[in-house]
């Protein structure tokens, strides 16, 4: 049986002392806690749903505590290993693999009937090694091309069109020799934002056995395309997520590649946005494949007995179709319940229509714990291409070698 290295386990167990305040003291079974990494607008919706749940269930109390994504993951590991933690932990599907290996979440399949689960998008039923470990309330969390309709009435459909249009849209508007308006801005220095083009060139991060597949022609060619966009000044020389958002909101970038978490901010800034597919890769005839993931709830392994019955009641409430639609109305999230998608908003809202269209060519984010090692291996090598320290060929090999090394360190036989 695979086990995390003893060094990692020792570190995690040593940290449990930080959570003794949550420790063995039994909480009131009517006092339910969710840890979440959701964005502010989503947390506002959750607060309103929890208030509604309490009114419908006198005597029961339900609260949320916010952590950033990495914090909620690491804090939950430490707390659950120490026998405590929240009743439910909310986050992206890729946390399931790590939580399963650590033995800190419990399968949900025995608590829900086949009929109950039949109306969920299959992607929302997050399984690992044949067991259901997460029940998601949303699917997507994916990148799309977002464009300013006033500046780009018709967005590019292919990368060749992007290159041609980009040369027209990137402009030195004040004649000082520097680009003031870029055709495109996005957080291309981060591997997650590189993934769509990796798929568009025919590659992916791992095979069916969760082994890295990074030293490939697809990786090399996708990297070269990103560098070409920068060298031809279609995108800024350097661009973080914050820079991309600022440029787009100010009209200094006509298009941006970003996800649903960003759309509300663009609209609030007064940008008339359209959402569509990231352009098809002309060299391959393939659509880019942004990672698609579910976000949802896992049940703490320490929750048992009557407390578990109350927690499951809350989980069923939070995933009712009408309650999932609250997130759709607030942040244009795509609900996991198929019947919720029959609501008229999905036929009327062009942003939701574009978002769903992008999903059709996306690819599910792997939930295997090896994905963590792959992310860690990709980042330094990929960024070394951007800063000119490595060629694309050298970086692809380094990604693969480092991923293999990190996976070997992660697991011990």
Image (cartoon, grey):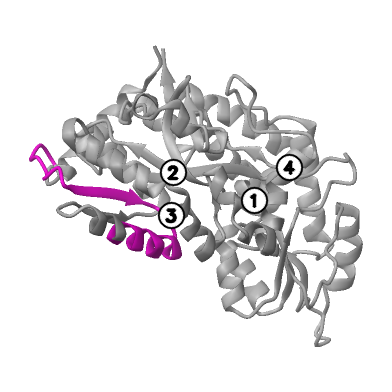
Where is residue 119 drawn, in percent x and y?
52, 37
Q: CA distance from mark 1 to mark 2?
A: 22 Å
- Residue 379 lies in quadrant: top right
**Label located before the other in sequence (1 or 3):** 1
Mark 1 neighbour class, 10 Å CA radius: few under 14, some 14 to 19, many 20 or more: many
CB atoms of marks 2 and 4 within 8 Å: no
Where is residue 308 drawn, in percent x and y?
23, 35
Element carrying mark 3? helix
Q: Disc 1 or disc 3, which is closer to the eye?
A: 3
Please name the residue shown 92% across and 62% down the image.
164
Which residue, given by chain and number where applicable, does mark 1 sit on?
193
Element carrying mark 2? strand
Residue 296 is tagged as 2
**Label located before the other in sequence (1 or 2):** 1
Mark 4 neighbour class, 10 Å CA radius: few under 14, some 14 to 19, many 20 or more: some
Q: Tell me where the magenta segment starts and ends, as one range.
A: 23-51
Element carrying mark 4? loop
Which residue, given by chain and number where applicable, does mark 3 sit on?
323
Residue 361 is tagged as 4
Work out which quarter of the rendered image holds the C terminus and state it: top left
């Amino acid at each position: 049986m695979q086990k995390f290295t003893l060094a990692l386990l020792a570190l995690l167990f040593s940290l449990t002392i930080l959570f003794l305040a949550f420790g063995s003291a039994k909480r009131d079974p009517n006092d339910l806690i969710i840890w979440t990494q959701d964005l502010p607008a989503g947390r506002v919706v959750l607060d309103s749903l929890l208030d509604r749940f309490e009114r419908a269930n006198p005597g029961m109390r339900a609260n949320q505590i916010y952590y950033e994504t990495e914090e909620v993951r690491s804090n939950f590991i430490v707390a659950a290993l120490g026998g405590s933690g929240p009743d439910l932990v909310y986050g992206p599907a890729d946390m399931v693999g790590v939580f399963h290996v650590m033995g800190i979440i419990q399968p949900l399949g025995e608590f829900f009937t086949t009929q109950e689960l039949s109306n969920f998008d299959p992607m929302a039923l997050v399984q690992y090694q044949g067991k259901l470990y997460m029940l998601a309330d949303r699917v997507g969390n994916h990148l799309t091309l977002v464009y300013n309709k006033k500046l780009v009435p018709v967005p590019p459909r292919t990368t060749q069109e992007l290159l041609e249009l980009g040369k027209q849209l990137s402009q030195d508007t004040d004649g000082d020799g520097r680009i003031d308006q870029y055709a495109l801005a996005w957080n291309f220095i981060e591997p997650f934002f590189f993934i769509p083009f990796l798929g568009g060139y025919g590659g992916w991060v791992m095979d069916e056995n969760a082994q890295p597949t990074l030293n490939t022609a697809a990786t090399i060619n996708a990297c070269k395309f990103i560098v070409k966009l920068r060298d031809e000044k279609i995108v800024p020389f350097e661009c973080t997520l914050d820079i991309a958002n600022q440029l787009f909101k100010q009209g200094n970038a006509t298009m941006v590649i970003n996800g649903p978490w960003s759309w509300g901010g663009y609209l609030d800034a007064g940008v008339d946005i359209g959402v569509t597919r990231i352009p098809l890769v002309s060299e391959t005839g393939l659509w880019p494949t942004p990672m698609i993931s579910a976000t949802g709830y896992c049940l703490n392994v320490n929750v048992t007995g009557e407390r578990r019955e109350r927690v499951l009641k809350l989980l069923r409430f939070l995933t009712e179709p009408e309650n999932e639609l609250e997130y759709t109305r607030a942040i244009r999230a795509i609900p996991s319940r198929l019947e919720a998608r029959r609501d008229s908003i999905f036929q009327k809202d062009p942003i939701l229509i574009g978002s769903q269209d992008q999903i059709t060519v996306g690819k599910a984010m792997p939930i295997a714990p090896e994905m963590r090692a792959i992310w860690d291996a990709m980042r330094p090598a990929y960024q070394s291409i951007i800063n000119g320290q490595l060629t694309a060929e050298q970086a692809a090999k380094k990604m693969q070698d480092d991923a293999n090394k990190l996976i070997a360190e992660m697991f011990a036989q």
